[in-house]
Image: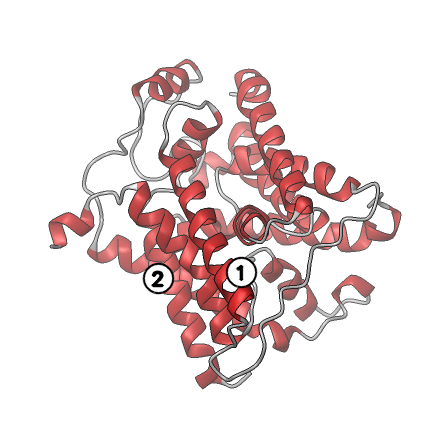
C-alpha cells in the first residue's frame, strides 16, 4: 500500500480529489475555495491604512488554516510517501529544458535556481522574487488565482473566471516560449 | 472563529497538501511541461477537478443543499461589468508569475512543507505584490 502511495499519483486520482475541495468547503460552512485570499488576509494583519486591507482577518482565519494545513500535508507526504525517483517528466520537456541549461530533474524544481544559492543569481532572483511578486499582484488584480478562478470559478460557470484563466495561460505561454529562452 | 471550528479546515488543507505534493502539481517542471503542451498530466488534473467541482456545485444548487450547520449555501457571482480589464490583465500578469515561479499560492505553501525553504521568499514577494495591488488599486483600470 505504501509502495503504491509513494508513487506519483495519476491525474485521475489527484484531479477528482482536488475537485472535491469545492463541495467540502461549501458544505462545511458555505466557504469558497481560493487560496490567494490569504495573501490579502495576511496583509490585513499588518498595521496598514490602505483601505483595501481594512477587513476583519479573523473572519478569514479558516482560509489561513487551510494554508497551514497544505504546508503540513506536503510535509507529511514528503516524510512518509516520498517518491525516491526523479520526476517522470516527458522526454520532450526534458529536451526543451536541457536547451535552457536545466539537465537535473530532482525534487520539485531546478536546484540551480530554487535554492538559497540560486536566489543570489540574477535568474534565480527573477524566477523567485519577480515571479512571486507577479503571482501576488496578478492574483489580487484578477480577483483570484488558480484555485479561485480555474477551479471554483470555472466549476460555477463564471465568465469572469474563464477570462482570467485565459489570461493565466496567455501569461504562462508568453514566459515559457518567449521570455525563458532569453532569460535562462 | 473558534479553534475547534477551524479543525475541519486544517484537515482539508492537509489533504490538499498531500494530493498536491503526490500529484506533482507543485513542480516547476510540471508547469513547464503544461505550458509546452507535452503531457496530459496537468490538463487531466485541472480538467477532472473542474468537472467534479462543477457537478457538485450543480447538485448543491439544484437540490438547495445546506451547510452542515443548516445554513443556505450562496455562491455570489463574480462581477463582470465592462470592460473587465482586471480579469484579462490581472490574469495575464498572474500567468507570467505562475510560469516563472512554477507555483501558484497554494503550491507555494506546499513547497515550503516539502522543505524548499527558499520558496518562502516567493511567498514574501507575493505578499509584497498583493500589498502593492492594494495601494495602486484606486488607479488601476478594472
Quarter of the image where one finds residue A52: bottom right
Does residue B17 sit above or below A94 in this rendering?
A: below
Residue A17 lies, in percent from the top left, at 36, 55
Q: Nearer the viewer, residue B30 or A20?
A: A20
Residue A97 placed where, x, y %?
40, 20
Q: Could you tell me which chain the residue with mark 1 belongs to? A: A
Q: Quadrant of the N terminus of chain B?
A: bottom right
Q: Residue placed at 74% from the left, 65% from the top?
A: A53
Q: Please state if B68 lies on the left or on the right of A52 as rendered.
A: left
Disc 1 designates what residue? A33
> Label 2: which residue?
B15
Above or below for B7 versus A147: below
Instruction: From this view, report whether residue A161 is shown above or below residue A29.
Output: above
Residue at mark 2 to residue at mark 1: CA–CA distance: 14 Å
Protein chain holding label 2: B
Q: Secondary structure at mark 2?
A: helix
Amino acid at each position: 500500500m505504501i509502495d503504491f502511495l509513494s508513487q506519483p499519483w495519476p491525474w485521475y486520482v489527484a484531479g477528482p480529489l482536488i475537485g472535491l475541495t469545492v463541495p467540502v468547503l461549501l458544505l462545511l460552512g458555505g466557504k469558497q475555495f481560493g487560496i490567494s485570499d490569504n495573501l490579502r488576509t495576511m496583509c490585513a494583519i499588518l498595521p496598514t491604512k490602505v483601505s483595501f486591507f481594512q477587513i476583519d482577518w479573523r473572519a478569514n482565519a479558516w482560509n489561513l488554516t487551510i494554508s497551514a494545513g497544505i504546508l503540513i500535508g506536503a510535509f507529511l507526504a514528503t516524510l512518509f510517501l516520498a517518491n525516491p525517483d526523479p520526476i517522470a517528466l516527458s522526454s520532450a520537456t526534458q529536451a526543451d529544458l536541457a536547451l535552457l541549461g536545466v539537465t537535473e530533474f530532482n525534487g520539485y524544481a531546478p536546484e540551480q535556481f530554487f535554492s538559497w544559492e540560486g536566489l543570489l543569481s540574477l535568474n534565480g532572483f527573477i524566477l523567485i522574487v519577480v515571479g512571486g511578486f507577479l503571482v501576488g499582484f496578478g492574483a489580487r488584480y484578477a480577483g483570484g488565482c488558480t484555485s479561485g478562478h480555474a477551479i471554483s470559478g470555472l466549476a460555477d460557470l463564471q465568465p469572469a473566471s474563464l477570462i482570467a484563466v485565459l489570461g493565466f495561460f496567455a501569461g504562462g505561454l508568453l514566459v515559457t516560449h518567449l521570455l525563458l529562452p532569453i532569460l535562462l | 472563529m473558534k479553534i475547534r471550528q477551524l479543525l475541519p479546515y486544517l484537515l482539508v488543507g492537509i489533504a490538499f497538501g498531500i494530493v498536491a505534493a503526490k500529484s506533482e502539481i507543485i513542480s516547476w517542471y510540471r508547469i513547464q511541461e503544461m505550458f509546452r503542451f507535452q503531457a496530459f498530466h496537468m490538463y487531466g488534473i485541472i480538467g477532472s477537478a473542474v468537472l467534479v467541482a462543477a457537478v457538485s456545485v450543480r447538485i448543491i444548487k439544484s437540490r438547495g443543499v445546506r451547510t452542515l450547520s443548516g445554513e443556505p449555501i450562496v455562491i455570489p457571482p463574480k462581477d463582470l461589468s465592462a470592460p473587465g480589464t482586471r480579469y484579462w490583465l490581472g490574469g495575464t500578469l498572474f500567468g507570467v508569475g505562475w510560469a516563472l515561479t512554477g507555483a501558484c499560492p497554494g503550491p507555494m505553501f506546499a513547497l515550503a512543507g516539502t522543505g524548499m525553504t527558499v520558496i518562502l521568499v516567493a511567498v514574501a514577494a507575493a505578499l509584497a505584490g498583493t500589498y502593492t495591488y492594494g495601494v495602486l488599486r484606486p488607479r488601476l483600470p478594472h
